[in-house]
Each structure stands twice: as C-alpha cells, then as structure tokens.
Amino acid sequence: MKVEKFLKFFKKTERLKYTLRHAWTGDKNRQESTAEHTWHMSIMAIVLTPYLKNKIDLMKVLKMIIIHDVGEAIVGDTPAFSKNHGDKHKVEKKAVLKIAGLLPNISKKEIINLYNEYKAKKSKEALFVKMLDIIDVIFQHFVSDISTWCEEEFTFNLNRDSEKYFKDEPLLLALYDKIVRKLEEKVKKSKTPI
C-alpha cells in the first residue's frame, strides 16, 4: 500500500506547480509559482555552495529547500508583509503535518524533521536556506516589473531587516547588499513615492 501513499503525496504536492506566490516573474503577465521559487533557490544553492565560508551539506540543503514551502500546497502563499503573517507559521505547520502524514513513516519523519530544522534556523543548512529564500524574494522583485508591486513592497523590500541572517557569510551578504541597492535604484528611477 506504500504506492498508494506516494501517489496521494505526489498529487497533493503537484499543486505547488500552480500555487501562485505574491511575486511576479520577469514576464509582467505572470506570477511566480511556489515550485518555481523552490527551483530557483535550488539553482542558487548549487552554484553558491562552493563559495560559502561555513561548509554545509548540500544534499540536506536541497531537501530543505524543496520542503520549506510545501505547506503552501494546502494554504497558499502569505507574503511576509501581510497582516496575517504571524498566523502563517501555525497554519503552514499544520499543512506540512497533513501532507507528510500521507507518506510512510520514514519519509514522513524526514519531511517533518527538515521542516522543523528550517523553521528553527539554528543549523548552518537552515540558515543558508533562509538566506537563499530572502535573496530569491528580493531578486524576484528586482527582475519583475515595478507595476506589479503593491504599496507595502516599496518599504518591505528595502528595509534591510533581513541583513542579520547574512553576517557570517560575506559573499551572500555582498549579494544581498547588491540586490537591495539595485532595488533602491529601480524605485528611484520609477519615481514612485515610498
């Protein structure tokens, strides 16, 4: 009966292909899906890992990236600036437990453990995934048309509150800083009031 469990899990997680995130792609006619966000973070992890100051387990990072937003298959995306963002973690955790519950025990435990480790942000791998998540979000705003931004994004994307996660990784801090500077230039050129 394991085959049936896997099929149910695959059917549920396939929703991530069409679960739209708040961010838009470089094509201003199309929003980004959760699956695309996950894929882009995975590409970043592969190319940036050799340059990290703190060595990490890339396989663990890739697994963590793949499941870090898996709850969105049930609850959808909640932007970080949303007023409901505080409830997001509880709701999303319930969704992850429900989705993982479709699996046989070994796989179920791995999904839950990786998700919990990511949320705790205590391991080098979890912190790296968090940094990649931040970089991908601000990069997506850099490449998307500014007309797709909502009012909150003009202050949220430029506030540098996330800089604290990058203090031990010089290259990633430089990358974060460069993208934020480009966002600042983009906003300035757009003559959109902040």
Image (cartoon, rainbow, N blue to C red):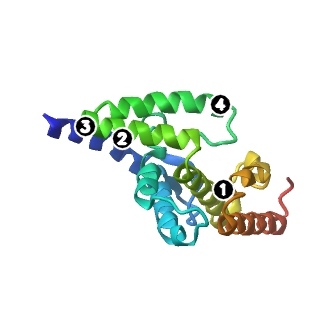
Please tell me whether mark 4 sits on a helix, a strand or a loop: helix
Residue 148 disc label: 1
Q: CA distance from mark 1 to mark 4?
A: 24 Å
Residue drawn at the location 45% of the way across and 58% of the way down: 57
The three-letter amino acid code for the residue at tag 3 is Lys
Q: CA distance from mark 1 to mark 3?
A: 35 Å
Q: Work out whether mark 2 precedes mark 3 in sequence or the reverse, and give the earlier one.
A: 3
Image quadrant in which you'd find residue 111:
top left
Q: Work out whether mark 4 precedes mark 2 in sequence or the reverse, and give the earlier one.
A: 4
The three-letter amino acid code for the residue at tag 4 is Gly
Check disc 4: other Cα within 10 Å, few if <14, some if 14-19, many if 20+. few
Q: Work out whether mark 1 precedes mark 3 in sequence or the reverse, and give the earlier one.
A: 3
Residue 104 is left or right of residue 16, and the answer is left
Q: CA distance from mark 3 to mark 4?
A: 29 Å
Image coordinates of residue 69 in percent, x first then y, are 48, 44
Please tell me whether mark 2 sits on a helix, a strand or a loop: helix
Residue 138 disc label: none
Say if residue 2 shows up in the picture.
Answer: yes
Q: Quadrant of the N terminus?
A: top left
Residue 8 disc label: 3
Please tell me whether mark 3 sits on a helix, a strand or a loop: helix
In this view, the mark in front (4 or 2): 2
